[in-house]
């Protein structure tokens, strides 16, 4: 099992550019989510999905889009990058079985927007 | 407002010097409290889940406990390899998979 994988590991964008952060998991987890981590702020939920074709917004969704066409993949799209989106992005996944909520995180993507 | 607060922000220990990290929470209908370890440049690594007051879990030198208002992560006789940021998170109410994180405690264990 590779667990949760993310690509790229590092990315530099110019303001206004768009890009997609990739996330995949091989654990057959129904739930997948994206967080951003900023100094002094803790991890904050951007978007999440409870299964293929179902997505919803988290705490800080503005400027980001997601889709879930398969159980394995959950890409995060930045539509028009802004310096405020400079952050470290983590993808996570978990089962949806009642009583089992722990989420497993990928290694992260460090994004810088200039 | 749902909130998770961790203290201290940073803690420096000598090897073998036991201590505790605190995680206090104000959420309605706690479903689960989670402890994660995060090494620099890595993603959070799952440690424990606690579900109800009075519950305790142990793993090597770490022991997590839960009350109705807070959780403690006790570190017994720490080693330098225990140095990391420890994150606390909760899920609550009907949002059983949406995690609310604290800002973490940066632990440094000196040999």
Image: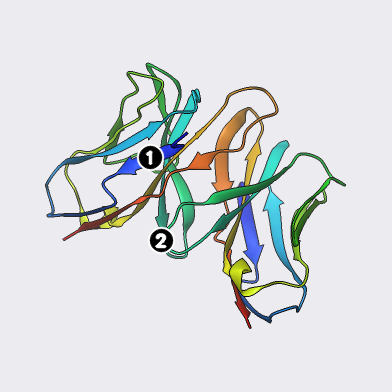
B25, above or below A2, in the image: below
- Name the disc covering residue B41, or none: 2
Q: Chain of mark 1?
A: A
Q: CA distance from mark 2 to mark 1?
A: 14 Å
Q: Position of residue A92 (x, y in %)?
A: 46, 39
Colour scheme of the picture: rainbow
Q: Residue at x 16, y 43 (%)?
A: A80
- Name the disc covering residue B26, or none: none
Q: Callout 1 environment at 10 Å: few (<14), some (14 to 19), or many (20+)?
A: many
Quarter of the picture containing the C terminus of chain B is bottom right
Q: Chain of mark 2?
A: B
Element on which disc 2 rests? loop
Q: Residue at x 63, y 39 (%)?
A: B91
B89, above or below A68, in the image: below
Residue furthest to the top in view is A53
B68, above or below A31, in the image: below
A82, above or below A51, in the image: below
Q: Is A69 on the left or on the right of B64, as rendered?
A: left
Q: Position of residue B64 (x, y in %)?
A: 76, 54
Q: Residue at x 62, y 67 (%)?
A: B82
Q: Is A63 on the left or on the right of B63, as rendered?
A: left
Q: What is the total number of numbered labels drawn onto the structure image?
A: 2
Question: Would you identify the image quadrant in which residue A7 lies?
Answer: top left
Give the residue pinned by disc 1.
Answer: A5
Discs 2 and 1 carry the same chain letter: no
Residue A58 visible in the snapshot: no
Q: Position of residue A3 (x, y in %)?
A: 46, 37
Which one is in front, A16 or A35? A35
């Amino acid at each position: 099992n590779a667990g949760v994988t993310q690509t790229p590991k590092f990315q530099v964008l110019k303001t206004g550019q768009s890009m997609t952060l990739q996330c995949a998991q091989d654990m057959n987890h129904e739930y997948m989510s994206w967080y951003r981590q900023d100094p002094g702020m803790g991890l904050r939920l951007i978007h999440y999905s409870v299964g293929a074709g179902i997505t919803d917004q988290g705490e800080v969704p503005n400027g980001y889009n997601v889709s879930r066409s398969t159980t394995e993949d959950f890409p995060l799209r930045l539509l028009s990058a802004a310096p405020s989106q400079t952050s470290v992005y983590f993808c996570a996944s978990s089962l949806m079985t009642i009583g089992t909520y722990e989420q497993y995180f990928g290694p992260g993507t460090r994004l810088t927007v200039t | 407002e749902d909130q998770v607060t961790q203290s201290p922000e940073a803690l420096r220990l000598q090897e073998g010097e036991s201590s505790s990290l605190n995680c206090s929470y104000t959420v309605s209908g706690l479903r689960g409290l989670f402890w994660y370890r995060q090494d620099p440049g890595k993603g959070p690594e799952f440690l424990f889940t606690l579900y109800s007051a009075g519950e305790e879990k142990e793993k090597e030198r770490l022991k997590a406990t839960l009350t109705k208002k807070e959780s403690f992560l006790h570190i017994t006789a720490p080693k330098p390899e225990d140095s990391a940021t420890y994150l606390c998170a909760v899920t609550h109410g009907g949002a059983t998979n949406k995690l609310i994180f604290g800002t973490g405690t940066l632990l440094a264990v000196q040999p």
